[in-house]
Image: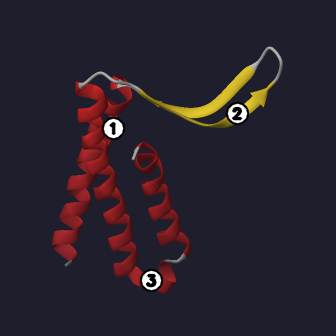
Amino acid sequence: MYLAIITLPLLGSIVSGFFGRKIGVSGAQLITCGSVIITTLLAIVAFFEVGLNNIPVSINLFRWIDSESLNVLWGFHFDSLTVSMLIPVYSPVLWLYLLQLIIFY
């Protein structure tokens, strides 16, 4: 779920950017709006899980540098500050995309 918060808007923009002519304007709008709406809902769930319960989540993807005395991991850390900043970033975007869906459909 936490990686989906990061990757869904990226995947939505890649699909609408590279395949926009094949899926059309309406398809690109639905894909980008859907990805942002799902991301906002996941950010709200993450806020309740991490922000209110104060349980940070760490996701280690892989080791970037692995030496004898130096180990650097590549990953994501979701703490209360991170998820509290997801809400003001994604909430206005959610309302804009919902307004766009209402006006154009």
User: Looking at numbered disc 3 in the image, what kind of residue is underneath it?
Assistant: Ile
Which image quarter: residue 56?
top left
Residue 17: percent from left, percent from top: 52, 69
* Front residue (pair 66, 23): 66
Q: Nearer the viewer, mark 2 or mark 3?
A: 2
Give the label on residue 23, or none: 3
Give the label on residue 25, or none: none
Residue 16: percent from left, percent from top: 47, 71
Which image quarter: residue 51?
top left
55 left or right of 75 in image: left
Q: Nearer the viewer, mark 2 or mark 1?
A: 2
- Direction top: furthest residue: 69
- Element at label 3: helix
Residue 30: percent from left, percent from top: 33, 72
**Looking at the figure, which quarter contains the C terminus?**
bottom left
Mark 2 or mark 3: which comes first in sequence? 3
Tell me whether circle 3 and circle 1 mark residues in contact (CB < 8 Å).
Answer: no
Density class for disc 1 (Cα within 10 Å; few <14, some 14-19, many ≥20) is some
Q: CA distance from mark 2 to mark 3?
A: 38 Å
Q: CA distance from mark 2 to mark 1?
A: 26 Å
Give the label on residue 63, or none: 2
* Front residue (pair 8, 61): 61
Mark 3 or mark 1: which comes first in sequence? 3
User: Looking at numbered disc 2 in the image, what kind of residue is underneath it?
Assistant: Arg
- Direction right: furthest residue: 68
* Front residue (pair 81, 52): 52
Give the label on residue 86, or none: 1
